Image: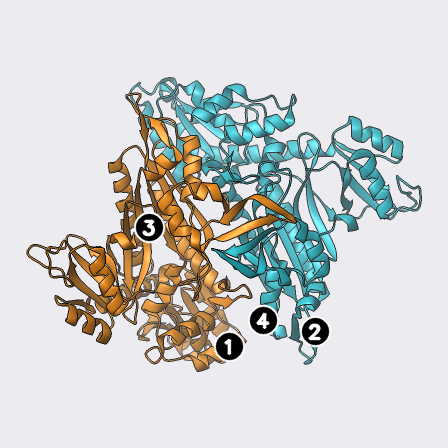
Chain colours: A orange, B cyan
Amino acid sequence: MSKIEKFVESITPRDEDFARWYTDICLGAELCSYSSVRGCIILRPYGYAIWELITAELDRRFKDTGHQNVMMPLFIPESMLQKEKDHVEGFAPEVAWVTHGGETPLTERLCVRPTSEVLFCDHYAEIIQSWRDLPKLYNQWVSVVRWEKTTRPFLRTREFFWQEGHTAHATKEDAVEETLRMLDIYEDFYRDALAIPVLKGLKSDSERFAGAVDTYTVEAMMHDGKALQAGTSHYLGDGFAKAFNIQYTDKDNQLRYVHQTSWGVSSRSIGGLIMVHGDDEGLVLPPAVAPIQVVIIPIATHKEGVLEEATKLRDVLKGTGLRVLLDDSDRMPGWKFSEHEMKGVPIRLEIGPRDIAQNQCVAVARDNRKKVFIALDRVAEEVPVLLDALHDRMLERAEKSMRERIYDVEQLEAFVRTMEEKPGFIRAYWCGSAECEAEIKELTTATSRCIEEGGDVEGRVCVVCGKEAHHSVFWGKAY
Amino acid sequence: MSKIEKFVESITPRDEDFARWYTDICLGAELCSYSSVRGCIILRPYGYAIWELITAELDRRFKDTGHQNVMMPLFIPESMLQKEKDHVEGFAPEVAWVTHGGETPLTERLCVRPTSEVLFCDHYAEIIQSWRDLPKLYNQWVSVVRWEKTTRPFLRTREFFWQEGHTAHATKEDAVEETLRMLDIYEDFYRDALAIPVLKGLKSDSERFAGAVDTYTVEAMMHDGKALQAGTSHYLGDGFAKAFNIQYTDKDNQLRYVHQTSWGVSSRSIGGLIMVHGDDEGLVLPPAVAPIQVVIIPIATHKEGVLEEATKLRDVLKGTGLRVLLDDSDRMPGWKFSEHEMKGVPIRLEIGPRDIAQNQCVAVARDNRKKVFIALDRVAEEVPVLLDALHDRMLERAEKSMRERIYDVEQLEAFVRTMEEKPGFIRAYWCGSAECEAEIKELTTATSRCIEEGGDVEGRVCVVCGKEAHHSVFWGKAY
């Protein structure tokens, strides 16, 4: 409590210092706390409750599409990590190594999983024998560890929380279909649960996941115009299958390698929620992932009947399945308003003696603070409507903000100037060469975020070298 | 599938070789798989689904009693682990040490958490200032690591899954009350969700958690008469608070140390489920934690109307909120019966042309295989009744099995003989000295499981030394 009150008074204005504003919200809304373990954060009850809701939203979508949860070990033996060459090159430099069990040195080092492709492969090699065993559609909810040098809450921490899906299929077509299905599920999750629009597309070779054939991504634009890679879905081909000898007997009794995918969304998504929707008063949460969807604040609680009516309101709303808090603490209403605004509670209901006399209460939406009077016997019907409208406004606002800040640029000089002057993404044509991509990064620090789906490149030329363009690409500075 | 069929034919009879029977069930019911990471298992979809249901059952009870979930880091710096002396002595010999991040040696070793008391303490020292901040009732769902030498699926693995509750209170009374509340919640969970009766009580000093003042335990008896420590709840006193300087200002403006508790139940509980309820056909699951509560097996699926009626049955039962599987695969019904018995599905519904003609289906309970005919329009009412009755029978059977195998013994010779000849627990009086306890362990390998609540020791003498008894104690060999 003491923390919130401190921060409610001292939150940095968002457009003055976005990075400090972000940290103020993380701490002030009590989402997380720095820990004594360098680079790792503590998820506090409110932050963890958001993560639980995110988990439930994604998990439901995974189960509806036939996926099953499993749990692989936390550790990977060094020799197992080394089996797929590209993969180990990508991850070995940033893993944490366990070398001792108690006093005893291990005969083989174990790394703490940075991602679990190799563990799933090792298991798949054991349990897949026939075409009848396919597809295998597995997922796990775990934390993974990458030894990052600079860290920021939710966006980049040494330990982070995520789901990682790992699937095995009989054919390339099945695996590619799965890769794209999961990308669509991620888009749907971001729009429908987090009210965050995303750009979907293929990553360039240099941004591809270590060991993948194709990496697809969903990219979101933050309030400051920077990109957040919000989820990725990889078509792994049969490279891992060959390294781990994952073969099955097909209907014609032929031995074949499986084709695989992997895909993940992490606790970064909480960082995205903050940076897309938050404002100078604090967090703004879309209803689907708000631990408290409605807070009821009684006014003049000492007056007869106020607490009783507020309690009735709470019970009615809880009965509809909403997550409701009646804040009957002894603090002043103004303090309560500030705290619940800081925490991003979507709807605040105020009820005092005058409201009761008129058989109504006052609803205030977190985003636009518009007041609506609701008849007390209409609350169960009206509040869900307000919540839906709030979600739609949040999504629309984010969508507009992103669309308005995608700049089409055809020349390198304009590219550099635009990236310097205007926060946002640039859409520009690209020949496909790593050199041109590297030059843009060198000149602007921006990277290719994704290749536009169905981008028409007919007759277009690369923004860097002027040669024939093969892709229309979204570029941006990224978290 | 191939695995199950192999095991359905080759499961070791339970009373011939209990250890092999146990492993056969773990693998045959596809609960888990050995991994290439020594001492760690893979939770397969069916095993993980049981764990998800166990998690939900416990989590609901925790939230109903005001607890909140959080997430602490995976790692503990060596210096933090060392702050509480008894605690570090207990755990340091069996922790996994991380010494390198990528190529770089760490300036301070980190252990992978074996339990998280010190991480919670470090956090509590930061967030607790005033009596208004108390109590803090936190819990987390994580895996922990202990470098065990010999391991067995679910019962003892290097990585295992659990919840760990960590609470801080203003007074000793509040903390002791919480310790006992959580013990009661564990008992309720075991009885009502897992149909497993437990003995509740205090641990002896030698069996106490490292760093605790008092450790309470729930102990269950397995089919082979051995004990499973099924959950523990610790009153930690203010020792950790002093080591970590967790102080608060009370209402009189005095600085005071908090009093703490911690408590945990782990994935061992799945081992308990297997060893209490399983039989020669496989697993027997209580309905509350059965991933599939009802399996519908259509007979003569080629006959007109059978699949349609089976599908209707499924939809009706799903509509009541039950977890239902319609097994319409092309295997013979006998194979399906065996598979779902192996997996411990509580109720099997059979429906064939003759049943349909008589407007009924056949229900078979997993435990006693009694057949009941149910009118098709009564299925939604009758099946839940069958499930409840099955739970009650399972609990009653387990209760009887435990009660019948608790032997009252007053002399050491009889103690040793009984422990050799009769699987089960012994209830015997004890003076309270570590020497007498050690002698029993030396002579029998049995340990004190817990001190009987309200055990009357008036005029009784210690079974070992013959001196005045201070406790009535349950003794047993333990997993």
Q: Residues within 10 Å of mark 3 (few under 14, many from 20)?
A: many
Residue B126's tag is: 4
Chain letter behind tag 3: A
Q: CA distance from mark 1 to mark 3?
A: 63 Å
Decide which of A326, B431 is in the foreground and name it: B431
In the picture, which quadrant includes the C terminus of chain A?
A: bottom left
Chain containing mark 2: B
**In which quadrant of the rendered view does residue A358 lie?**
bottom left
Q: Are marks 3 and 2 on the same chain?
A: no
Image location of residue B111, percent across then percent down: 59, 55
Do the residues at discs 1 and 4 belong to one chain?
Answer: no
Identity of the amino acid at label 1? Answer: Glu
Q: Which mark is residue B256?
A: 2
Residue type highlighted by circle 2: Arg
Q: Nearer the viewer, mark 3 or mark 2?
A: 3
Query: Going by the image, does B95 lie left or right of A336?
Result: right
User: What separation in Å lies between label 3 and label 2 (alpha carbons)?
Assistant: 53 Å
- The reply to whether dot 1 and dot 2 touch (C-beta < 8 Å) is no
Q: Which label number is shown at residue A304?
A: 1
At numbered mark 3, what does the secondary structure look like: helix, strand or loop?
loop
- What's the amino acid at mark 4? Glu
Tell me which chain the residue with mark 1 is part of.
A
Give x and y (percent) for residue B313: 38, 31
Residue shown at the point (92%, 46%) measured from the top left: B468
- CA distance for labels 1 and 2: 38 Å
Sequence order check, earlier mark of 1 and 3: 3
Give the secondary structure at mark 2: strand
Secondary structure at numbered mark 1: loop
Q: Bin the neighbour count of mark 4 within 10 Å (Cα to Cα): few under 14, some 14-19, many 20 and up.
A: some
